Amino acid sequence: MKFFSCDLCGADDPIEVPRCREYTGGQAIHICSRCGFVYVQYRRTADEIAGSWSDDIYGEGYTSAIPAVKARHLYVAEFVENCIGLNDKKLIDIGAGEGNFMLEASWQGAKCTGIEPSRNNVQQIIGCGFDCFQGTIESVATSQRFDVASVLWTLENCQDCNAMLSKAWELLKPGGHIVVATGSRILVPFKKPLQDYFSTNPADTHCFRFSFKTLVAMLWKNNFTTVDQNRFIDTDYLVVIARKEPYVNLLEVGSLKGDNPQAVASFFDRWHSESQRYA
Ligand SMILES: [Zn+2]
């Protein structure tokens, strides 16, 4: 296991998410005491984490071919189409799963390619007529450049969100856009009991939990400027679209706008109390 400092600001003095061990089988999840980012400190390699997803979690019957998952992919495709347009755009879907989003985006006219670690999923995607690289984003080598990179319900599940975002940056043409969607957003109304939010899967299969502010800051740190976001307060997921900027050192740690760590701790405390009635 490798130790990670806060992925957003680099600080190393976190507090624990209150009561989280009651829901995670004793595993710790931390809140950075400087920027409020929620992250897991100890992580396996990117390949091992991807292996957990493709062999254990997918292998146990997780499928995106259910109404709730299809609906969220349709939602994102429509949202992106309305904001920046998809027709004739070259799109790369990072962590493509079973290719559902690529299908939705292609119906909007996008030309889609996937990156996906699971061999079974890759075969399914190719069977739908798309190109797909097998592997993690870290292992993909291509000189192709894209107009849109989608990272949907994936950024929170990788080993190193900065590595994933900087690789997405590389894969985009100048002025290209990244689309990030996550269901594990925080500092919003509770959408389900905490026992259904945390799990006893290895904690490093879900290393990050973003608020809108920390996602915008993480994108900014990786040279993306946020141009649009969905109504995440009353939707079950947070979707952010950001534009690739030329590489300049945008990062000044003091100016990163994260969250108040105590407010984040208090959010989880209140969520724990509220969840007791469903226990
Ligand atoms: Zn931090």
Image (cartoon, rainbow, N blue to C red):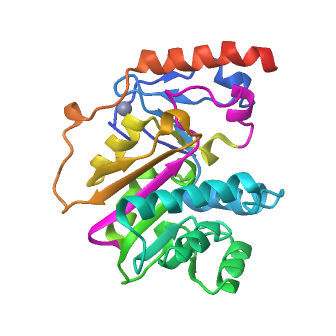
Task: Tell me where residue 60 appears, x and y as whole percent.
Answer: 83, 56
Residue 18 visible? The answer is no
Q: Nearer the viewer, residue 104 or 177?
A: 104
Figure label count = 0
* In this picture, residue 168 sits left or right of residue 120: left
Closer-to-camera residue (212/59): 212
Residue 136: horizontal and vertical position, in percent? Answer: 54, 67
Q: Quadrant of the C terminus?
A: top right
Q: Ligand 1: which quarter?
A: top left
Query: Which x, y percent locates residue 206?
Result: 60, 44
Q: Which residues are magenta?
A: 172-201
- Residue 52 in the magenta stretch? The answer is no
Is residue 240 something that shows in the picture? yes
Against 197, residue 249 (above or below) is below
| Residue that appears at 45% across and 24% down | 14
Query: Residue drawn 63% across and 87% down?
Result: 129
Q: Nearer the viewer, residue 121 or 73?
A: 73
- Which residue is drawn at the image coordinates 58% and 20% (left, top)? 268
229 on left or right of 193: left
Q: Nearer the viewer, residue 187 or 50?
A: 187
The quadrant holding residue 247 is bottom left
Looking at the image, which residue is at 65% across and 66% down? 97
Compared to 74, does 264 lie above or below?
above
Residue 173 colored in magenta in the image: yes
Quarter where residue 135 is shown: bottom right
Name the side, left or right, on which 147 lies relative to 15: left
The furthest residue to the left = 248
- The image quarter containing residue 48 is bottom right
Seen in the picture, residue 186 relative to 170 is either above or below; the reply is above
Residue 22 % position (x, y): 73, 22
Looking at this view, name the residue that lies furthest to the front: 82
